[in-house]
């Protein structure tokens, strides 16, 4: 069972991330300070510094939390019984969760708005990558690697992230970072910021959502064949 101290620590991290994302959405990232975030979360600035190096990391975590994505830091406690016991279950639970995220049109709107935030504040982008890097050092990853094998888990996570990247491009349209843009570079030099249409995300209809879900089903069909059907 997770200790009371560990639960309080996780709750504080979640409160800081939620406060950071809410304030950044309301005011813009540049208008928010770490003092603002700490005050909104009801803690001291020193407490903020114990959890986050800067506001950008907290904003990214807050965005992901708002989508229902759990942020796993290296020192977060995890119970083995809470994780899938077979690789098939891991694939199926991942499929169900991702489909749930993209079924909600409000989530798609959030993803599009966050993309605009990242384009206006390129300093956020490295912290998106950092979330995935941190997961590789989390207890969740360690337990899954012990259960199914390091190579298989790492390959599956990599394939899953690649599939997510394609889905995000689909919902972002012109907001997506160009494919020829090196990682962590932000907006491509070829993009013209004065071009109004280049910053407009597509409007999603129920048919568009159905298309996204079809892409998810196809992606997991390949993942299921590659990782479970061996």
Image (tube, rainbow, N blue to C red):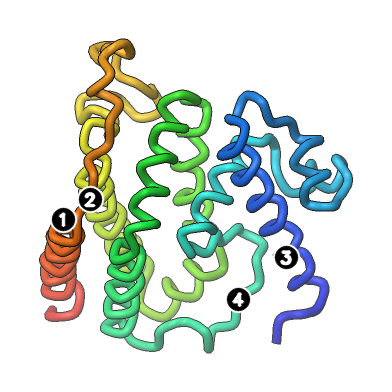
Crowd rating for badge 1 (residues with CA inside 10 Å; few <14, some 14–19, many 20+): some
Label 1 residue SS: helix
Name which residue lies at 52% across and 39% down: 127
Residue that badge 3 annotates: 11
Front disc: 1 or 3: 1
Label 3 residue SS: helix
Crowd rating for badge 4 (residues with CA inside 10 Å; few <14, some 14–19, many 20+): some
Q: CA distance from mark 2 to mark 3?
A: 34 Å
Label 4 residue SS: loop
Q: CA distance from mark 1 to mark 3?
A: 36 Å
The mark total stands at 4
Residue that badge 4 annotates: 78
Residue that badge 1 annotates: 208
Crowd rating for badge 3 (residues with CA inside 10 Å; few <14, some 14–19, many 20+): few
Front disc: 2 or 3: 2
Q: Quadrant of the C terminus?
A: bottom left
Label 2 residue SS: loop
Residue that badge 2 annotates: 204
Tell me: 221 left or right of 145.
left
Between discs 2 and 4, the one toward the N terminus: 4
Name which residue lies at 47% across and 49% down: 133
Quarter of the rendering containing residue 102: bottom left
Between discs 3 and 4, the one toward the N terminus: 3
Q: Is residue 112 above or below residue 116?
A: below
Front disc: 2 or 4: 2
Circles 2 and 4 in contact, beta carbons < 8 Å: no
Name which residue lies at 12% across and 80% down: 229
């Amino acid at each position: 069972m997770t200790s009371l101290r560990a639960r309080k620590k996780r709750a504080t991290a979640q409160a800081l991330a939620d406060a950071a994302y809410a304030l950044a959405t309301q005011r813009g990232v540049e208008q928010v300070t770490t003092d603002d975030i700490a005050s909104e979360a009801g803690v001291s600035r020193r407490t903020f510094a114990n959890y986050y190096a800067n506001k950008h990391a907290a904003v990214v975590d807050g965005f992901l939390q708002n989508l229902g994505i759990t942020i796993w830091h290296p020192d977060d406690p995890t119970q083995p019984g809470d994780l899938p016991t077979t690789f098939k279950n891991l694939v199926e639970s991942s499929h169900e969760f991702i489909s749930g995220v993209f079924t909600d049109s409000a989530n798609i709107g959030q993803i599009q708005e966050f993309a605009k935030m990242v384009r206006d504040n390129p300093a956020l982008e490295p912290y998106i990558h950092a979330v995935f890097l941190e997961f590789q050092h989390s207890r969740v990853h360690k337990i899954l690697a012990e259960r199914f094998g390091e190579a298989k888990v790492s390959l599956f996570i990599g394939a899953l992230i690649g599939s997510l990247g394609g889905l995000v491009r689909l919902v972002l349209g012109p907001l997506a970072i160009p494919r020829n843009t090196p990682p962590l570079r932000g907006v491509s030099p070829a993009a013209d910021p004065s071009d109004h249409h280049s910053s407009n995300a597509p409007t999603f209809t129920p048919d568009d959502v159905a298309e996204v879900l079809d892409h998810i089903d196809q992606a997991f069909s390949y993942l299921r064949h590659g990782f479970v059907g061996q």
